Image (cartoon, rainbow, N blue to C red):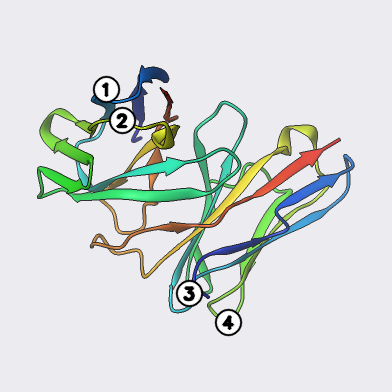
Amino acid sequence: GAGVSQSPSNKVTEKGKDVELRCDPISGHTALYWYRQSLGQGLEFLIYFQGNSAPDKSGLPSDRFSAERTGGSVSTLTIQRTQQEDSAVYLCASSLGTGPTNYGYTFGSGTRLTVV
Amino acid sequence: KQEVTQIPAALSVPEGENLVLNCSFTDSAIYNLQWFRQDPGKGLTSLLLIQSSQREQTSGRLNASLDKSSGRSTLYIAASQPGDSATYLCAVTSYSGNTPLVFGKGTRLSVIA
């Protein structure tokens, strides 16, 4: 597509429920990144994919968080047994690759998650 | 561990004023530095990308400089307009092909008409 698409744009869920967030990157972009932005905080790196592989999962805040990417395209971020501290805007970005060249990052509009 | 700091956290200026936003990073071994703009409730828009070998980049009224050795970057906005009101984020890619962007917390800019 023309840009990075994230869905849903807003999600309100009850504490303890599972949620799935979706990211559809720009066609042809092999690298995909998930970030979290809490109120008043900077962007916190969660995980990135090169193709379908996630070389670095160290940013995931707990084992309740998982992510996958299939077909080198769409990625889903799953949060199990949501907690109130999971409330944040979850941003996805994609780029042509992860090499240190002139690859720009294109961000989606994010999913605002509210756990009540 | 790379850390990025942005000063000031918030800035309010009258329309037409020239202004400078500051960004500093602790590890000078970076590949590149990017400035982004974020409007309320929106994603991030890339403004300027400076490779580590470059000293500055310009786009319209925006000019970003990079002093890698001192770990500093500035974003200069000329003749500010109310439409420039947004949060400006600085981010660096450190010396590893697998390292994602590390962001500062941003500067929230308000340009008053």
Which residue: 19% across, 36% down? B28
Q: Quadrant of the C terminus of chain A?
A: top right
- Looking at the image, can residue A101 be seen? yes
| Residue located at (62% from left, 29% from top) | A39
* Crowd tier of the residue under label 2, counting other residues whose Cα lies within 10 Å: few below 14, some 14–19, many 20 or above: many
Q: Are marks 2 and 3 in contact (CB under 8 Å)?
A: no
Asked whether the residues under marks 3 and 4 belong to the same chain, the reply is: yes
Residue at mark 3: A51
Who is closer to the viewer here, A113 or B101?
A113
- Viewer-nearest of labels 2 and 3? 2
Q: What x and y, as percent, mark residue B55?
A: 9, 42
Vertical arrangement, residue B1 with respect to residue B107, above or below? below
- What is the spatial separation of the Cα atoms under label 2 and label 3, in whole angstroms? 41 Å
Label 3 marks which chain's residue? A
Q: Kindly report the distance in space between the C-alpha atoms of the residues bearing marks 3 and 1.
A: 45 Å
Indicate the secondary structure of the residue bearing disc 2.
loop
Mark 4 or 1, closer to the camera: 1
- What is the chain letter for disc 2? B
Which residue lies under the disc numbered 2? B80
State the residue position of label 1: B17
User: Which amino acid is tagged 4?
Assistant: Gly
Local packing at callout 4 (Cα closer than 10 Å; few below 14, some 14-19, many 20+) is few
